[in-house]
């Protein structure tokens, strides 16, 4: 049994905060929104939180720990094809971080969430609510962004559904991805293909970078919140 420390504390906090913010955003748009009096306002605030979290995550994808970096979890097309062939044979190649398909899915999810959060900054319901940057663009641009926001939202629902299916599939194969995102450690039967050694991820290795990224994200959200 190989026990690998994979997900650092910033990534785990980001992940669960994002789950909560996206769930709240979805709830306030797809339901009556009770107990909120103006659910569209809560939806917008949740969107700002999502945007702040994404600002941090994109920064951490460049300056964070090993498995959080974008160039670590993106693979060449050949690696993705080989992983697909392995799945067809019924095997699950061991990866400490994201596997080749999972890494691609993470990138697509982050891009789609970013599009959703950014496009939402320019919208209005033409009655009670105006997003912080609605007045900064022409009406036609806002209408185009509204359409993008709607259809990208539908794409996000599909992506989240596929993510949940993938979690279930891996759990049936014996890989507990949810637990690893809680405590940060993976237990694998074989040495992972994406780790040359079994040295742990150090949560405190880059506290200055994490704090700086968090401050930038909080400052950006606070500025938009007050507009």
Image: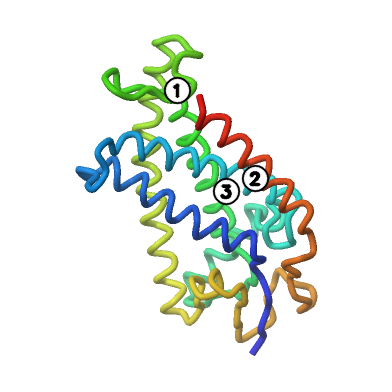
Q: Residues within 10 Å of mark 2 (few under 14, many from 20)?
A: some
Determine the image quadrant of residue 37: top left
Mark 2–mark 1 contact, CB under 8 Å? no
| Residue at the disc numbered 2 | 58
Q: Position of residue 89 (x, y in %)?
A: 49, 75
Viewer-nearest residue: 172 or 13:
13
Tell me the crowding category of disc 3: few under 14, some 14 to 19, or many 20 or more residues within 10 angstroms, Cα based. some
Q: Which residue is nearer to you in this view: 144 or 86?
A: 144
Which residue is under mark 3?
107
Decide: is 149 above or below 10. Answer: above
Q: Residue at x 50, y 48 (%)?
A: 109
Q: Is residue 210 left or right of residue 125?
A: right
Residue 186 at x, y percent in the picture: 60, 78
Q: Secondary structure at mark 2?
A: helix
At 40% from the left and 53% from the top, the residue drawn is 160
Sequence order check, earlier mark of 3 and 1: 3
Q: CA distance from mark 2 to mark 3?
A: 10 Å
Residue position for label 1: 122
């Amino acid at each position: 049994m190989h026990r690998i420390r994979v997900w650092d504390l910033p990534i785990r906090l980001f992940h669960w905060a994002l789950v909560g913010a996206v769930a709240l955003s979805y709830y306030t748009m797809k339901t009556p929104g009770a107990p909120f009096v103006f659910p569209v306002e809560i939806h917008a605030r949740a969107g700002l939180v999502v945007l702040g979290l994404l600002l941090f995550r994109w920064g951490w994808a460049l300056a964070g720990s090993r498995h959080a970096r974008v160039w670590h979890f993106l693979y060449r097309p050949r690696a993705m094809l080989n992983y697909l062939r392995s799945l067809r044979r019924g095997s699950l190649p061991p990866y400490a971080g994201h596997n080749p398909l999972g890494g691609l899915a993470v990138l697509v999810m982050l891009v789609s969430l970013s599009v959703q959060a950014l496009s939402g900054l320019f919208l209005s319901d033409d009655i009670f609510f105006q997003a912080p940057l609605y007045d900064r663009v022409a009406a036609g641009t806002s209408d185009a962004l509204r359409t993008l926001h709607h259809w990208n939202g539908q794409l996000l629902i599909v992506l989240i559904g596929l993510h949940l299916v993938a979690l279930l599939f891996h759990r049936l194969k014996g890989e507990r991805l949810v637990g690893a995102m809680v405590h940060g450690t993976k237990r694998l039967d074989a040495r992972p293909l994406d780790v040359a050694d079994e040295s742990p991820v150090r949560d405190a290795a880059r506290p200055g970078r994490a704090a700086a990224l968090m401050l930038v994200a909080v400052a950006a959200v606070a500025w938009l919140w007050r507009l």
